[in-house]
Image (tube, rainbow, N blue to C red):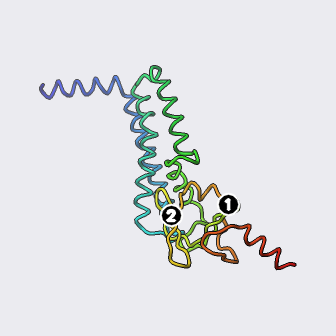
């Protein structure tokens, strides 16, 4: 193939698929702009929360992966991929993805909770937190937030690994006035107060 034939085939391709190329470049530009917008927000949130610098890279990396995963179907649609035959499969995949990212019992919901915790201003490194689960509680200092769990340190220098999805779905007291102990029952303190009143 000589140079003229190559140029002719490139011009023919561009004439046929100019709208597809334009929309693809637009999607890539949107991905770039969203990525450029989210990275400073993640960095600012992590610096405000006093977490380690490595968390910025991993959070930005996972945010970019999620962004690319959601943009791939858009690019396939632009280039004419026929989704009609895959409607049942794509519905099933979307349902499973939704359940995996947001259902309380799912491991992947910890990733969603990770980003919520990063943006939330009260979950800062060094804050003392009491997580209440019905009549039980766990308390400690927030030491580190990972992709799937948060590490708490107690006054006795013990580590508690707590899942992110449970951390945002349970009532929590940040920097309570009174510290009880690492793990316990709230009913014990309620009954001791009743005894003190008598």
Q: Secondary structure at mark 1?
A: loop
Q: Is 100 above or below relative to 117? A: above
Front-most of residues 73 and 177: 177
Query: What crowding class fits label 1: few (fewer than 14 Cα within 10 Å), some (14-19), or many (20 or more)?
Result: some
Q: Which mark is residue 161?
A: 2
Residue 187 on image: x %, y %? 74, 67
Which-is-in-front pick, marks 2 and 1?
2
Q: Is residue 116 left or right of residue 62?
A: right
Q: Is 78 above or below relative to 42? A: above
Farthest left residue in view: 2
Number of numbered discs present? 2
Q: Which mark is residue 171?
A: 1
Q: Look at 77% across and 75% down and name the residue there.
A: 192
> Do the numbered discs 2 and 1 sit on residues whose CB atoms are within 8 Å?
no
Q: Is 51 above or below relative to 11? A: below
Q: Secondary structure at mark 2?
A: strand
Residue 73 on image: x %, y %? 44, 33
Q: Is 33 above or below relative to 184? A: above
């Amino acid at each position: 193939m000589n140079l003229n034939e190559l140029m002719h085939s490139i011009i023919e391709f561009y004439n046929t698929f100019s709208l597809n190329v334009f929309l693809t470049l637009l999607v890539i530009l949107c991905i770039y702009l969203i990525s450029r917008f989210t990275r400073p927000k993640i960095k600012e949130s992590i610096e405000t929360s006093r977490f380690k610098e490595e968390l910025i890279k991993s959070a930005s990396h996972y945010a970019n992966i999620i962004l690319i995963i959601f943009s791939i179907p858009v690019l396939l649609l632009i280039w004419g991929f026929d989704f009609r035959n895959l409607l049942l499969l794509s519905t099933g995949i979307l349902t499973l993805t939704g359940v995996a990212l947001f259902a309380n019992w799912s491991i992947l919901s910890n990733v969603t909770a990770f980003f919520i915790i990063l943006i939330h201003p009260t979950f800062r490194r060094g804050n003392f937190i009491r997580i209440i689960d019905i009549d039980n509680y766990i308390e400690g200092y927030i030491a580190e937030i990972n992709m799937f769990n948060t590490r708490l340190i107690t006054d006795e220098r013990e580590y508690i690994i707590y899942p992110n999805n449970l951390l945002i779905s349970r009532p929590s007291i940040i920097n309570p006035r009174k510290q009880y102990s690492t793990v316990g029952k709230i009913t014990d303190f309620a009954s001791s107060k009743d005894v003190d009143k008598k």
